[in-house]
């Protein structure tokens, strides 16, 4: 696929000696919403973190718009899982959203009035502008999620990688996120989400990546969401693949075997 | 004469020393004051970041890790010049930092254990070297044992110049890097995703913490240094919700503790400064915990007390509504709420003590929610405004009961208890939201009682027409 926003090439990841993902490769189309789906512990979030360079890769690479992440940082926005942050931190909504501008600011620079306008616009897009002076610990879970989305929007990126944006949010937020997806798609932006809810995958997303420790299927939602594929995804891991990859890591075979 | 006796009970010298200290005649003492205050400010500001990143114990371990460096530098260079001591301490603190981060990454030892191991190993090593030095014949060794608990008054001007310079540098660096440090402290993963040069920022943070620990050695000492890093921000959390004001408050608290300690150290030079500083800080912490507005203990108790009074008042309004409802009402008309009831009537339908009820009625009367209370207290009657409130409370109560039965599928018998609590909390906005969300907008609650119509809405409607 030419000019794909994201190409994943043979990614292998592990946690200590346990394999988490084995040889995952795919590329995604532009201006689509894409879901990464799989059971708990299947490595969905880990894959996203690996792609973003937040967790080490054993091997493989992620290519963004034909380049390495470091060269395309400004084109890529990441929305971490809400639960991973300290929501008691002494900071207000506006300052969190302004963090989205810090990829472009030098270490001594403060956000300018342009940055503030961009941040306010981002808050408006998720209907949170009224909350801009609120402390983040006064927000509901759904509102927290929308603040994180606004922060990513403030980056004005072309590719958005989101870790479970729909997890534990209220109906209002769910609708706000769906509307936002449509807006972004219309502007030719691409969205990749880790998603856990099989009931809504087909409705919310154009493309689906099914994984369970390995890649099971990738393609348009209608093609991929078949009973056979879902059985494979939710039917547990392949025990031989799991055991032997673990042996591979434990014995350090990579080091003694010639390429 | 009598008035002065209080002072004369003190050692006469102390009062004189106090005046001497604050008239700034002793240049050295003034430098000690400046240095101690600057240390208090800079340590509390940089300590705040360690605190917010949940790395509170790191400062403690780093302070202990500085001790052997000081001793080794002294043995090697046979001098106690401030720069030599400073770099000795920095070097060994960094060794400690390295060990603390290396162990968890490369062994099965967890970070807390690594910290404890590092702390005790370096401290033991430092103490061993200290006792070795005590047996040597080198000039200047007498100051070294002051490193344990600190002694501000014994510091020389050259020590203080270095200290002040470093403290000011730390503060300026924090101001420059403030935005990035805040981002990292709040959301490390996001900072990495933005492509921050994490090695650079982590190194700068580490250098700032290490240097502020090291300059504190002569004033606070290795044993208690952690308290100066952490207690101010812990106290400041009660005062502010915003990081910049929180850092400022922490700085003020740290500075004040430095000020008091320098004064005490001047008046009683034999006493170690560190314990004084920590005691002052702890007192400031306790004061913050108790008296801070909004977040302090007393403020919370006061809020709870006010809420309790409000709940009691609203409960009586609700009871009066229900009593009115039970009285013969005209059919198919708006509910009449102008009947009178006695204390017994109220106490029969709500379990409330007589004293509490009388007090609550008195407050309702003062607020104009019930019509003037007669002396016999037999005809208690809602005022117009009281009726409005009673109706609104009843709406909230009954709507919530409907919400629970329709949306949450709770049995009608079980919803009353929850609605009894929620009626005090629902805002107007939320009440409207419930009305919208309930599909079959029944005019009755699950027990078949009528949900009244708010008079405010009625008034608006009549204005419109």
Image (spheres, coloured by chain):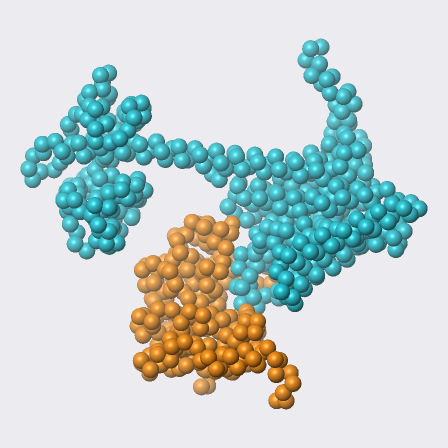
Residue lying at the far bottom of the rendered structure: A258
**B431 sits left or right of B165 in the view:** left
Residue A190, percent across and down? 42, 74
Residue lying at the far left of the rendered structure: B331
Q: Is residue B288 above or below residue B409?
A: above
**What residue is rendered at 21% in x and 28% in y?**
B348
**Quadrant of the image containing the C terminus of chain B:** top left
Q: Camera-side residue: B19 or A184?
A: B19
Residue lying at the far right of the rendered structure: B137
Residue B461 visible in the picture: no
**What residue is rendered at 26% in x and 51% in y?**
B433
The colour of chain B is: cyan
Write down which chain is painted orange.
Answer: A
**What residue is rendered at 62% in x and 39% in y?**
B253
Number of numbered callouts drawn: 0
Residue B104, percent across and down? 64, 63
**Quadrant of the image containing the N terminus of chain B:** top right
Q: Is residue B347 above or below residue A208?
A: above
Q: Camera-side residue: A122 or B255?
A: B255
**What residue is rendered at 7% in x and 40% in y?**
B332
Residue B10, percent across and down? 73, 20
Residue A178 visible in the picture: yes
Residue B137, percent across and down? 93, 46
Q: Is residue B360 above or below residue B38?
A: above
Answer with the quarter of the image where residue B340 lies. Answer: top left
Answer with the quarter of the image where residue B424 lies. Answer: top left
């Amino acid at each position: 696929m030419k000019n794909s926003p994201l190409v994943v090439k043979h990614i292998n990841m592990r946690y200590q000696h346990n394999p988490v993902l084995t040889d995952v490769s795919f590329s995604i189309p532009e201006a689509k919403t894409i879901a990464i789906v799989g059971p708990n512990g299947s490595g969905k979030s880990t894959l996203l973190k690996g792609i973003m360079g937040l967790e080490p890769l054993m091997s493989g690479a992620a290519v963004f718009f034909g380049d390495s992440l470091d060269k395309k940082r400004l084109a890529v926005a990441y929305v971490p899982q809400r639960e991973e942050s300290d929501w008691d931190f002494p900071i207000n909504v506006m300052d969190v959203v302004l963090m989205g501008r810090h990829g472009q600011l030098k270490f001594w620079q403060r956000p300018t009035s342009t940055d503030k306008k961009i941040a306010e616009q981002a808050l408006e897009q998720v209907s949170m502008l009224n909350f801009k002076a609120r402390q983040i610990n006064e927000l509901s879970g759904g509102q927290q999620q929308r603040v994180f989305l606004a922060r990513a929007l403030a980056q004005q990126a072309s590719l958005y990688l989101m870790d479970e944006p729909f997890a534990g949010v209220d109906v209002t937020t769910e609708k706000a996120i769906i509307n936002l997806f449509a807006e972004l798609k219309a502007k030719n932006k691409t969205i990749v989400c880790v998603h856990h809810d099989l009931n809504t995958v087909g409705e919310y997303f154009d493309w689906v990546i099914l994984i369970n420790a390995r890649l099971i299927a990738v393609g348009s939602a209608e093609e991929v969401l078949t009973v056979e594929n879902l059985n494979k995804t939710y039917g547990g891991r392949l025990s031989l693949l799991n055991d032997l990859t673990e042996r591979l890591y434990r014995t350090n075979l990579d080091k003694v075997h010639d390429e | 004469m009598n008035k002065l006796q209080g002072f004369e009970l003190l050692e006469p010298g102390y009062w004189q020393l106090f005046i001497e200290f604050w008239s700034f005649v002793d240049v050295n003492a003034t430098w000690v004051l400046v240095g101690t205050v600057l240390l208090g400010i800079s340590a509390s500001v940089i300590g705040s970041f360690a605190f917010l990143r949940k790395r509170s114990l790191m400062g403690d371990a780093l302070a202990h890790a500085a001790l052997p460096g000081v001793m080794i530098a002294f043995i090697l260079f046979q001098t106690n010049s401030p720069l030599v001591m400073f770099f000795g301490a920095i070097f060994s603190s960094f060794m400690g930092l390295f060990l603390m981060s290396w162990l968890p990454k490369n062994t099965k030892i967890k970070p807390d254990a690594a910290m404890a191991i590092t702390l005790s190993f370096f401290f033991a090593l430092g103490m061993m070297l200290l006792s070795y030095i005590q047996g040597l014949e080198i000039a200047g060794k007498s100051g070294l044992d002051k490193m344990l608990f600190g002694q501000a008054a014994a510091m020389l001007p050259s020590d203080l110049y270095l200290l002040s310079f470093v403290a000011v540098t730390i503060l300026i660096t924090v101001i420059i890097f403030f935005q990035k440090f805040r981002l990292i402290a709040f959301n490390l993963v996001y900072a990495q995703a933005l492509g921050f040069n994490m090695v650079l920022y982590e190194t700068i943070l580490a250098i700032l913490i290490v240097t502020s620990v090291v300059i504190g050695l002569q004033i606070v000492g290795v044993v208690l240094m952690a308290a100066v890093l952490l207690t101010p921000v812990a106290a400041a959390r009660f005062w502010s919700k915003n990081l910049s004001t929180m850092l400022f408050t922490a700085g003020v608290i740290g500075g004040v503790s430095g000020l008091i300690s320098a004064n005490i150290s001047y008046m009683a030079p034999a006493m170690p400064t560190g314990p004084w500083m920590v005691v002052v800080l702890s007192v400031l912490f306790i004061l913050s915990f108790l008296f801070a507005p909004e977040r302090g203990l007393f403020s919370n108790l006061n809020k709870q007390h006010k809420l309790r009074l409000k709940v009691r008042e609203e409960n009586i309004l609700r009871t009066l509504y229900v009593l009115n409802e039970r009285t013969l009402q005209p059919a198919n008309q708006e509910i009449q709420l102008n009947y009178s009831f006695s204390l017994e009537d109220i106490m029969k339908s709500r379990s409330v003590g007589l004293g509490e009820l009388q007090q609550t009625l008195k407050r309702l009367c003062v607020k104009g929610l019930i019509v003037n209370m007669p002396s016999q207290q037999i005809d208690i009657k809602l005022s117009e405004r009281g009726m409005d409130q009673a109706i609104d409370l009843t709406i909230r109560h009954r709507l919530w009961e409907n919400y629970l039965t329709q949306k949450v599928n709770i049995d009608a018998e079980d919803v009353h208890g929850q609605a009894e609590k929620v009626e005090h909390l629902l805002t107007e906005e939320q009440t409207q939201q419930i009305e919208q969300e309930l599909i079959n907008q029944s005019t009755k609650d699950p027990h078949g009682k009528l949900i009244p119509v708010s008079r405010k809405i009625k008034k608006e409607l009549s204005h419109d027409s």
